[in-house]
Image (spheres, helix red, strand yellow):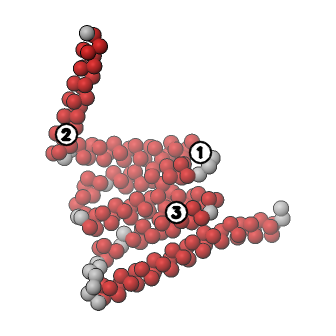
């Protein structure tokens, strides 16, 4: 395979991703423009606080679409997964209260793990390093989330009750098998 053939092959494999990018970008601009007009005419109340997470979410979606159109672009799954995770988190915050981040901050630790795990499960052959690299931040973030929620009144009561219930179940099984 000559040098010119390689560049043509590369250009042809990148073409669907480029077309996806143009499509998603164009549609996104039209949608943002429509929402802007609806806001300008008072039909829909749109504030920057509600819109800015889309600047994380849209590139993440573009990365995901580009991968599904061309499986050779698997490296886009990691930033895509991170951006979508954080975009959804900030959309949630913009519609509730940013104070909720005091409970959901571990998602920042989990986001890279989500991207790496997504790449592990969606690319073939799966590489063990991606799994380990994804499980570690996801697991650490999950532990932080668990202990953060455990400090809240509901969870600080519910978790010990669950432990008592599980313990009673094992004691019941233990004494039932003896008789």
Q: Are marks 1 and 3 in contact (CB under 8 Å)?
A: no
- Rounded to the nearest angstrom, the CA distance separating label 2 from label 3 is 38 Å
Q: Where is residue 83? Give x, y as percent.
A: 44, 62
* Camera-side mark, 1 or 2: 2
In this view, the residue in front, 61 or 141, is 61
User: In which quarter of the view is residue 146 placed?
Assistant: top left
- Rounded to the nearest angstrom, the CA distance separating label 1 from label 3 is 19 Å
Above or below, 30 relative to 7: below
- Judged left or right of residue 64, residue 157 is left
Q: Where is residue 54? Give x, y as percent.
A: 39, 71
Quick one: SS at disc 2? helix
* Camera-side mark, 1 or 3: 3
Badge 2 is on which residue?
Answer: 158
Badge 3 is on which residue?
Answer: 64
Q: Earlier in the sequence, mark 1 or mark 3?
A: 3
Disc number placed over residue 127 in the picture, else none: 1
User: Residue at point 36% right, 62% down?
Assistant: 88
Which class describes the residues within 10 Å of circle 1: few (<14), some (14-19), or many (20+)? few
User: Hey, which residue is sitting farthest right in the picture?
Assistant: 2
In this view, the residue in front, 158 or 107, is 158
């Amino acid at each position: 395979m000559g040098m010119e053939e390689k560049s043509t092959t590369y250009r042809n494999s990148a073409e669907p991703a480029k077309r996806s990018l143009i499509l998603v970008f164009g549609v996104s601009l039209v949608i943002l423009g429509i929402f802007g007009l609806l806001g300008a005419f008072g039909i829909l109340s749109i504030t920057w606080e509600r819109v800015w997470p889309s600047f994380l979410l849209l590139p993440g979606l573009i990365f995901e679409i580009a991968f599904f159109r061309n499986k050779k672009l698997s490296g886009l799954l990691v930033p895509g997964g991170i951006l979508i995770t954080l975009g959804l988190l900030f959309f949630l915050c913009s519609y509730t209260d940013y104070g909720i981040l005091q409970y959901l901050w571990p998602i920042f630790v989990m986001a890279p793990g989500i991207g790496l795990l997504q790449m592990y499960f969606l690319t073939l052959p799966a590489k063990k390093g991606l799994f380990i690299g994804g499980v570690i931040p996801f697991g650490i973030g999950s532990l932080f989330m668990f202990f953060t929620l455990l400090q809240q009144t509901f969870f600080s009561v519910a978790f010990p009750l669950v432990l008592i219930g599980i313990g009673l179940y094992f004691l019941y099984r233990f004494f039932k098998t003896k008789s």
